Image: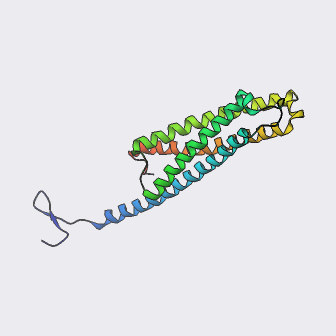
């Protein structure tokens, strides 16, 4: 029997065709390259969400002016919500940056694939909406403070609050982009049984 030929069940000879092998290798290489680009894009969005949410938290946590009569960020529920939500999103984004770097460098997820897919998607959704609601509350409070002339006497406090809220909205935007991509991965997982088939 010549090499490359195998007997089939009926006793005849089967000659394997090289065509399907070449095609499947090509498809897997393309798929690996697409996944790598996709993972790098998610990493960029997660890094941007981390930077903006960390900056938002830092601006709010440091928004205190001297004097007992001056407003402090922790005296307002909405500003406390902004600071804490931004800090939580920064920590979550830092974890997801690490998970993305791990996935890009090792080619595998931190958790089992099914857990990773749903973990990323559900947490992106929860934290994005938490940050959005915190910044919406912060915007409403900042507007109220301007109407009450609080900002006339303490303009620096109001400006720093506005910057913190604006940075939080930017963080939400990038976390929202990450959420769209992780949602796309959930759909790929449901349709194909793997997040890596695109």
Query: Which sits in the foreground, 38 or 68?
Result: 68
Q: In this view, does 120 lie to the left or right of 14?
A: right
Q: Nearer the viewer, residue 13 or 87?
A: 87
The mark tally for this picture is: 0
Report x, y in % for residue 49: 62, 46
At 69% across and 35% down in the image, what residue appears?
A: 135
Q: Nearer the viewer, residue 116 or 90?
A: 90
> What colour scheme governs how the chains and residues are painted in the rendered image of this protein?
rainbow
153 over 98 or under it: above or below = above
Residue found 74% across the figure and 33% down from its top: 73
Q: Residue furthest left?
A: 11
Quadrant containing the N terminus in the rendered view = bottom left
90 above or below 130? below
Residue 192 relative to residue 56: left or right? left
- Work out whether 125 lies above or below 46: above
Where residue 196 appears, as percent x and y from the top left, is 43, 51
The quadrant where residue 126 appears: top right
Q: Residue at x 68, y 41 (%)?
A: 57
**Residue 31 in the image, given as x and y percentages of width and height:** 44, 57
In this orientation, does residue 81 appear?
yes
Q: In this view, does 55 lie to the left or right of 14?
A: right
Asked if one can make out residue 131 in the rendered structure from this viewpoint, the answer is no
In the rendered image, residue 40, in percent from the top left (x then y), is placed at: 54, 56
Q: Residue at x 47, y 60 (%)?
A: 33
């Amino acid at each position: 029997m010549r090499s490359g030929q195998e007997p089939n069940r009926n006793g005849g000879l089967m000659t394997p065709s090289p065509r399907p092998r070449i095609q499947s290798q090509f498809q897997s290489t393309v798929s690996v390259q697409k996944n790598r680009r996709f993972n790098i894009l998610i990493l960029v969005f997660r890094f941007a969400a981390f930077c903006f949410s960390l900056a938002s938290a830092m601006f709010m946590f440091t928004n205190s002016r001297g004097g007992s009569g001056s407003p402090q960020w922790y005296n307002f529920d909405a500003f406390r919500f902004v600071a804490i939500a931004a800090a939580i999103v920064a920590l979550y984004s830092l974890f997801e940056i690490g998970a993305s770097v791990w996935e890009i460098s090792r080619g595998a997820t931190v958790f089992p694939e099914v857990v990773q897919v749903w973990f990323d998607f559900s947490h992106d959704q929860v934290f994005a909406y938490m940050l959005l609601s915190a910044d919406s509350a912060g915007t409403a409070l900042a507007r109220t403070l301007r109407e009450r002339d609080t900002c006339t006497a303490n303009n620096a406090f109001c400006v720093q609050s506005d910057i913190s809220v604006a940075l939080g909205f930017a963080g939400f935007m990038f976390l929202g982009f990450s959420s769209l991509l992780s949602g796309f991965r959930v759909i790929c997982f449901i349709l194909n049984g793997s997040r890596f088939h695109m």
